[in-house]
């Protein structure tokens, strides 16, 4: 009897063990996509979205077989800005992640609806406001925004169109130059000359090249009258032309003396940023016709590009000129972590890629140094990367509570970052409009209102304070 009981016990235990083993086994098959999910969140989500939503309406450039995508992940695709992960994952992991990516992308809807309710009254720490939509419709990626003296807004669509928005009506402007749309390149910034009333000059920054494999950023100037650009001329062309599809810059600001400052990214080749013989990874200063001011810092340096004002930048996409203090502020994309907010000084070196608070996308060390003599430290840095697209300062009295603070568009986390400032330092921050979509631009207009451009679907909103 006792033996029989013992036998039964051993028997039951064995069965239980077998069941749990098979459970673990089947579970293991099921966890392999979960492993891929974990890898995805660790390495990919910051650029492609947590739910792969930035693969929406996907046209594969390099094919979507498991073999193609595995190769994309392993070796990267520099031409379109996709980093390599061969060192971060085993071949098996890469393959599992490729399978996961292909399966999930097939399920992503063409346009991912935002979960943000734009009709809400929004309570920030120091201000209550609502959003008013001022432009939408034809926009997908509204990149640049500028304002004419009559209050009309100019807005670029990265795919190559320029629109004028007048009292809510959006009209396409004629005479826009041909641009190359590739990777992060396309029609980028638009700026209005400080003396527009007299000369009708507007400026455009755009990707241009002999062909799609030899590209860089150009800036051109034309005269805008009655919805049409005439006498458009390129006044600056960044060199060298390259097949890279990333880090074009490019924001434009004028200072009080009428000098034009613009930023160019290092075009995916980090060594460019420390090399004064090319345009890439620099902030430049030119006159309004493209000629070089005699007091630029490197005019007497042999072989240096004469328009360079500062160097050692990665991809500066936010530029703000503070009239009151005569200071230029900039923000730029770091790699994985290490996005920076800087004060731009004449002739200064901002250190990329010698110093950085960031690491490589695959998690490996980029540089052990975050500071070095002769290199400028950022005023603030972001870890993790917010992906700063733009920069403006709140100086208008319309936003009491925000006055003196900086706003940066966040592409990665889809919100507007408010950097709360005191004595030129970021003392705190606040996330505004969280999950509204990739915030491509933020500008305080001459009317004192702040305008925010969001991607896919492209919209421009005005921030309207609500008083109790
Ligand atoms: C630094 C940002 C960044 C990170 C991190 C990143 N990618 Fe990409 N990836 C890009 C860009 C930019 C493109 C080109 C634009 C596009 O296709 O969306 C791209 C394209 C791709 C493509 C399409 C290639 C084709 O043939 O069209 C795949 C697949 C891909 N990425 C998968 C991944 C996966 C999986 C990871 C994580 C291991 C990852 N990416 C991490 C930026 C990134």
Image (cartoon, rainbow, N blue to C red):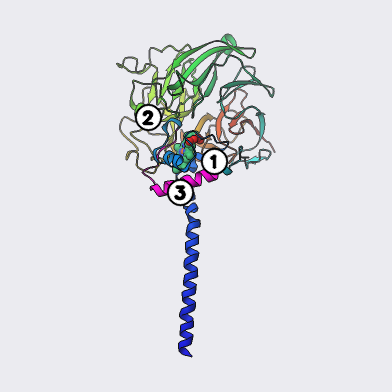
In the rendered image, the vertical position of residue 394 relative to residue 260, given as above or below: below
419 relative position to 292: left or right: right
Between 222 and 432, the one lying in front of the other is 222
Report whether residue 290 is seen.
yes
- Crowd band around label 2 with a 10 angstrom C-alpha radius: few (<14), some (14–19), many (20+): some
In the rendered image, the vertical position of residue 97 relative to residue 391, given as above or below: below
Distance between the alpha carbons at the discs numbered 2 and 1: 33 Å
Report whether residue 414 is seen.
no
Q: Circle 2 sits in a helix, a strand or a loop, which is it?
A: loop
| Mark 2 lies on residue | 269
| Mark 1 lies on residue | 430
Q: Circle 3 sits in a helix, a strand or a loop, which is it?
A: helix
Q: Circle 1 sits in a helix, a strand or a loop, which is it?
A: strand
Instruction: Determine which quarter of the picture holds residue 430.
Output: top right
Nearer the camera: disc 2 or disc 1: 2
Q: Earlier in the sequence, mark 2 or mark 3?
A: 3
Distance between the alpha carbons at the discs numbered 1 and 3: 37 Å
- Crowd band around label 3 with a 10 angstrom C-alpha radius: few (<14), some (14–19), many (20+): many
Please provide the residue range marked out in magenta.
Answer: 81-104
- Measured from the top left, where is residue 245 in percent x and y? 45, 28
Distance between the alpha carbons at the discs numbered 2 and 3: 30 Å
| Mark 3 lies on residue | 96
Measuring 53% from the left and 29% from the top, which residue is drawn there?
392
């Amino acid at each position: 009897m006792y033996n029989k009981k013992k036998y039964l016990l051993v028997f039951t235990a064995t069965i239980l063990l077998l069941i749990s083993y098979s459970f673990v086994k089947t579970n293991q098959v099921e966890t392999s996509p979960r492993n891929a999910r974990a890898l995805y969140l660790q390495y990919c989500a910051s650029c492609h979205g947590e739910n792969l939503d930035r693969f929406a309406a996907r046209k594969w450039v390099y094919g979507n077989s498991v073999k193609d995508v595995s190769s994309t992940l392993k070796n990267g695709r520099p031409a379109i800005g996709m980093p390599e992960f061969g060192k971060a994952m085993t071949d098996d992991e890469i393959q599992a992640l490729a399978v996961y990516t292909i399966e999930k992308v097939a399920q992503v809807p063409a346009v991912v609806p935002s979960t943000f309710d734009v009709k809400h009254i929004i309570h920030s720490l120091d201000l209550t406001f609502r959003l008013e939509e001022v432009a939408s419709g034809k926009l997908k990626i509204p990149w640049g925004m500028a304002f004419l003296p009559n209050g009309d807004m100019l807005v670029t669509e990265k795919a190559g169109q320029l629109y004028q928005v007048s009292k809510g009506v959006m009209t396409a402007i004629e005479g826009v130059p041909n641009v190359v749309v590739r990777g992060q390149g396309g029609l980028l910034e638009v700026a209005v000359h400080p003396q527009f009333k007299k000369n009708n000059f507007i400026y455009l920054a755009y990707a241009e090249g002999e062909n799609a494999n030899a590209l860089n950023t150009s800036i051109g100037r034309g005269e805008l009258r009655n919805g049409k650009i005439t006498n458009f001329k390129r006044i600056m062309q960044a060199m060298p032309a390259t097949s890279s599809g990333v880090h074009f810059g490019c924001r434009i600001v004028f200072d009080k003396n009428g000098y034009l400052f613009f930023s160019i990214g290092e075009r995916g080749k980090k060594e460019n940023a420390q090399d004064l013989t090319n345009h890439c990874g620099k902030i430049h200063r030119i006159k309004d016709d493209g000629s070089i001011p005699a007091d630029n810092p490197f005019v007497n340096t042999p072989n240096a590009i004469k328009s360079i004002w500062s160097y050692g930048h990665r991809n500066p996409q936010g530029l703000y000129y503070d009239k009151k203090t005569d200071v230029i502020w900039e923000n730029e994309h770091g790699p994985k972590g290490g996005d920076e907010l800087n004060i731009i000084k004449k002739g200064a070196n901002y250190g990329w890629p010698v110093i950085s608070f960031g690491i490589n996308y695959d998690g490996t060390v980029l540089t052990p140094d975050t500071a070095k003599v002769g290199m400028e430290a950022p005023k603030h840095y972001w870890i993790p990367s917010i992906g700063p697209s733009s920069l403006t300062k709140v100086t208008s009295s319309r936003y009491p509570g925000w006055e003196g603070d900086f706003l940066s568009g966040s592409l990665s986390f889809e919100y507007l970052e408010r950097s709360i400032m005191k004595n030129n330092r970021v003392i705190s921050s606040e996330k505004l409009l969280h999950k509204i979509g990739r915030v491509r631009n933020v500008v305080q207009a001459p009317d004192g209102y702040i305008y925010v451009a969001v991607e896919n679907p492209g919209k421009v909103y005005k921030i309207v304070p609500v008083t109790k």
